[in-house]
Amino acid sequence: MAEKSGKSENAQTVEKVEKGEKSQAKAPDSTRRSERSRRAIYDAALALVGEAGYGRTTIEGIAARAGVGKQTIYRWWPSKAEVLLEAFLERGDRAAASDPALPDTGDLEADLKQVLRATVDELTDPGFEAPYRALAAEGVINPDLGAQFARKLLEPGLQLYVDRLRAAQDAGQVDPGIDARTAVELLVGPLTHRWLLRTLPLTHAYADSLVEYALRGIAPR
């Protein structure tokens, strides 16, 4: 009798395991579903800001565009500014993963011109420009968001320039006595100023001239 009881218990255990496995197989993958929803929200936020502007973009609009409930968005982010910042950061992370450093061909001038020209293309792309301007403006009146914007988005990009200039210093192409972080601002500062204030057109020729002028100032003495 004990042997029969043992077999019965074993059979029940196997049956429970099989049912559990089937149940798990049928259950939705909540992690994957959440990731899909998050990506849809990112895409919706960036698209709406580009189409309607930051002021007319709402959490309700983002939710409708993404096909999720607005409660889902509020569960993850406290405001549309936070949604937009994270969407922009995620976009930047994907770009950085495919190209994690500035080019280093040994020709500093050519490398910097290539990067600044790409920056001009990015800044004049409506899909990039609208959310970037929105975040920059919101960061002025929202200090916490502004600090996150600088720390998470701006500084990592600037550090790539710093690393490239330090490599050029090691190669004897740049004055070893200059501060690389300050030198970077000679390149990107004027570009950002012209873009932000729309004083004059942002062109490849302008980007090239910034590189040429900056390199004259930081060349080895």
Image (cartoon, rainbow, N blue to C red):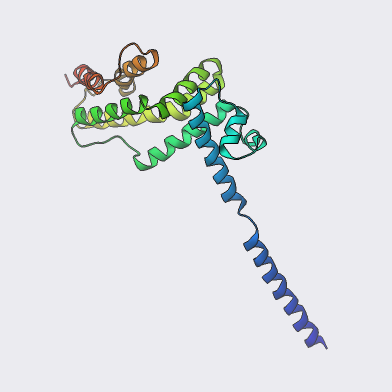
Q: Residue at x 69, y 66 (%)?
A: 20
Closer to the camera in the image, 11 or 48: 48
Left or right: 146, with 116 as reference point: right
Q: Quadrant of residue 2?
A: bottom right
Q: Is residue 183 visible?
A: yes
Placement of the C terminus among the 4 image quadrants: top left
Counting from the top left corner in percent of width and height, residue 96 is at 38, 38
Is 92 rendered above or below residue 17? above
Q: Residue at x 67, y 71 (%)?
A: 18
Given the current orientation, which residue lies at the most extreme left position? Answer: 221
Left or right: 105, with 26 as reference point: left
Is 135 rendered above or below residue 73? above
Q: Residue at x 60, y 54 (%)?
A: 29
Counting from the top left corner in percent of width and height, residue 115 is at 28, 30
Q: Quadrant of residue 199?
A: top left
Counting from the top left corner in percent of width and height, residue 167 is at 26, 32
